[in-house]
Image (tube, rainbow, N blue to C red):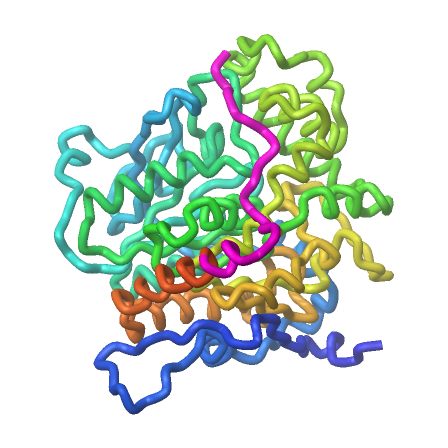
Amino acid sequence: MDIGRFFGYASISFHNHPSTIALPPKNNNPETEHPTLLDLCKNVTPPCRLNPLLFNGHLQTCWTAVQSQDIPIYYKRHVFFAEDPAFAGAFAVDFVVKPYEGKDESLPPRTTFYKDAEFQDIGSRDNKPMLVVLHGLSGGSHEIYLRSVLRPLVDAGWEACVVNSRGCARSKITTGVLYNARATWDMRQVVTWLRMKFPDRPLFGIGYSLGANILVNYLGEEGENCLLRAAVVCSNPWNLEAGSLALQRTWLGLVYSKTMGASMKKLFEDHIDEISKNPRVNIDKVRKIKYLHEFDRELQGPTWGYPSEGAYYRDASSCDSLLAVRIPLFAIHAEDDPVGSREMYAFWISAQLPQIAVKEAIPFQEFKQNPFTVLCSTSLGGHLSWFETGGERWFAKPASRFLMKVAQDIDLDTLEKTKVQTAETKANMNSKAPASFDPMRRKLEIDIRV
């Protein structure tokens, strides 16, 4: 038994390629050895000392619903419309702004809409680093876990925006579909738009839980052409089928699944007028579901054309996409993420809990194959939790420090050349091999127009 957990002491492990990429520093001295991605990740990761009263993943995760710490971040929202007709519809992006007076009761706290004239002048030639954020299951820009990382970055002069999944954060959908776990199209449009409006800003990404899964899928799809310079993912479920089966394996897992299923049913009911126009969706069946996997079976499957929830999970998982990532990626994960663990201590409260990411779904071997990626795993922490005694979340420290270090200390233009060289080397290797593995080969040709 690990006695240290009862004192809040979490062990930290790193999982990575034997030779992670070298990160060329600014003001480069040719005689100085470049630090590696692993060096940087280790340097920005402090000891993990958590609240000893929250000594397992269940307690840590449940505490997300009862802790009361507030981190004020103000946003202004703009509604974008998809440029690709295959993914038609509207989605909301919340941009971090300076504090202001006034509120909009139709939106989350500290969020108002941009005025049209105000938004038209949003572009800039400044070179501030900018972060693009993807939230977790049925969440949004208001989630405190993402604000805990935004705060130190914004205080350091960063710009940021949150891409809200369709229908989340009190946004309205305009077609008969919600988002799914491989819904990378809105992220892609926003990043392309940001590059156009802010040509001199280095862009970075961070994703949480289901948003982390979407972000890794996006990074894999973009490969060496990715416009982001580096990224962080926290509590990624990675292998969605493994996570789903873990939820169904224990009574506590079913409790979590029921809570998440209820949260998705609420999202469904909030947008029932539009979703009911989709002829592929049986409204009565969706209303009868109890668990998350049933929701995915009755809504996500028919909506997107998957024959079962298992087919959807296998196609949308990001564990293979990890192999195609070609920018520095730092992943943070707690090995006691609660569902599927064999803890004896189980507590439950009726509150919205995030998507769960079990240890057996972590692609440890894939991390060892890609020099652009590093995984930091902790023995304690729960799901998007890692609560310290003072109420702060430990993961915000390595996540924000990593991003700041890359932006401040690394020669990003030279690093860009590393992506191209790595891609060329891989292409030469594949040309000599009798067969090649494409981690981004998908089974579903998406056409969501109804």
* Residue 297, position as x, y percentages in the image: 71, 26
In this rendered view, identify the residue nearer to me: 214 or 128.
214
In this rendered view, identify the residue nearer to me: 102 or 297.
297
- Residue 376 relative to residue 121: left or right: right
* Residue 395, position as x, y percentages in the image: 53, 66
Q: Residue furthest bottom?
A: 31
Above or below for 84 versus 189: above
Residue 84 among those drawn in magenta: no
Instruction: Please state the extent of the stretch shown in magenta in the rendering.
Output: 428-450
* Residue 223, position as x, y percentages in the image: 43, 51
Residue 363: quadrant of the picture: bottom right
- Residue 251 relative to residue 38: left or right: right
Q: Residue at x 29, y 39 (%)?
A: 76
Q: Main secondary structure of the magenta part?
A: loop
In this rendered view, identify the residue nearer to me: 137 or 214.
214
Q: Residue at x 46, y 38 (%)?
A: 184
- Residue 123 in view here: yes
* Residue 415, position as x, y percentages in the image: 32, 67
Residue 432 among those drawn in magenta: yes
